[in-house]
Image: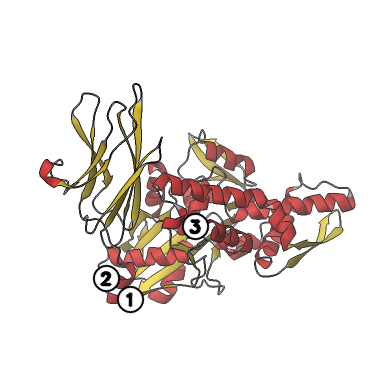
Amino acid sequence: MAAIGVHLGCTSACVAVYKDGRADVVANDAGDRVTPAVVAYSENEEVVGLAAKQSRIRNISNTVMKVKQILGRSSDDPQALKYITESKCSVIEKNGKLRYKIDTGEETKFVNPGDVARLIFSKMKETAHSVLGSDANDVVITVPFDFGEKQKNALGNILVFKLGGTSLSISVMEVNSGIYRVISTNTDDNIGGTQFTETLAQHLASEFQRSFKHDVRGNARAMMKLMNSADIAKHSLSTLGSANCFLDSLYEGQDFDCNVSRARFELLCSPLFNKCIEAIRALLEQSGFAADDINKVVLCGGSSRIPRLQQLIKDLFPAVELLNSIPPDEVIPIGAAIEAGILIGKENILVEDSLKIECSAKDILVKGIDESGANSFTVLFPSGTPLPARRQHTLQAPGSISSVCLELYESEGKNSAKEENKFAQVILQDLNKKENGLHDILAVLTMKRDGSLHVTCTDQETGKCEAITIEVAS
């Protein structure tokens, strides 16, 4: 049996297949390994992929892009409102549901965003079946971290359709897809390739206005031409020092020729780069990790090819290895295909070795006292936590005492921690007594892959510190 992994991004989609112990990306009928996530409607047909993207200049009002941003959302959703404002294809509310308004001249129809997504996934299915045949119906679909239940349900519902007489088996899963996913789901602006392209297109519009005294920002057709040119230039600037943008008859018969250097592009997009890095910093803080705890970074998504962004990531993680042997557009679907292979019961040694992850065997808890004076326990490392892992815990104690003890327990989850489950303690002695106030003790616990646990307790006021290492904590 074989399995399929699909990644639907805002601007593109990619499919990989798992077969004979390995996962590979499949090229579409045009020979491209990545397919634009674009659907164009005309009077007689629905076009998906590259052809739809290429025709969007002359058919902009009937071309749907970035459908993932509106899928499963209601009209009062802030992200949906932002999308509706920016979309060149009209989006209206009809019978309480958001619909694309498609006007082909002969008729006006209202298209469900789910139907748009289904067309894209059908294209991916056909691409996968071109090498697997129609028997492969097990699919893992990647979704962003910020997808709520409504978005996941919408995605699952639209994909339950018949395929070659067999029901499609679908597993909609949250997949941690590395740097690009961190960027695209931990900032309000959903920073991705489109934002860099839009920024460059706005610069080109300003250059045109400076040269020809015409502001084309309100002209949808001209701006779409600039977007196409900016997108090509952005890709070129990942490998070249400069890129030329030439547009024939951009506005009122006037040709436009502009050269953009990589330095200019980096300056224009500097705020976006900063947002990317701040999103990564925020994720580190949220997870309790420091930059020094990270030893490898996987680059995912087309924007991670931008040299400036790579350099900023290297500056943030100076000791890490940037893993980019797989093209960043293909990392996510390959991971999804491998996951699909696991789910259907593949027992291949190569896959098992590549996916082996050490985890904590038991819950690791810290003992505290609640408001009533009774003992309470806080789980710091739940059983199954992927290792290495790092956690922080603040322990407060009355200022009238001169020593504080941090006690650690383990539990298999069936029963609450008991005294006999205590396996370590750290004692901070000779603390300065206070008549009023509390001692604030910061405990930092780092569990390594071999199960050893390093614990450091620091008095926040004086900096006094004690540390221990437990060889095998779990």
Q: Nearer the viewer, residue 258 or 451?
A: 451
Residue found at the very far top of the displayed protein: 436
335 vs 253, left or right, is: left
Which numbered disc covers residue 417?
none
Circle 1: residue type: Gly
Cα gap from disc 3 to disc 1, whole angstroms: 26 Å
Few, some or many C-alpha atoms within 10 Å of disc 2 (few <14, some 14-19, many ≥20)? many
Q: Position of residue 298 (x, y in %)?
A: 47, 63
For residue 329, say whether it is visible: yes
Asked if the residues shown at circle 3 and circle 2 are in contact, with their CB atoms under 8 angstroms apart, the answer is: no
Few, some or many C-alpha atoms within 10 Å of disc 3 (few <14, some 14-19, many ≥20)? many
Q: Residue at x 66, y 62 (%)?
A: 54
- Report the residue marked by disc 3: 179
Q: Position of residue 205 (x, y in %)?
A: 78, 51
- Report the residue marked by disc 2: 346
Q: Residue at x 37, y 60 (%)?
A: 140
Circle 2: residue type: Lys
Circle 3: residue type: Ile
Label 3 element class: helix
Number of numbered discs? 3
Label 2 element class: loop
- Report the residue marked by disc 1: 21
Using the rendered view, name the quadrant where residue 348 is placed.
Answer: bottom left
Sequence-first disc among 3 and 1: 1
Using the rendered view, name the quadrant where residue 161 is placed.
Answer: bottom left
Q: Is residue 37 above or below residue 92?
A: below
Q: By what rule are the colours in the image chosen?
A: secondary structure
For residue 191, say whether it is visible: no
Residue found at the very far right of the displayed protein: 212
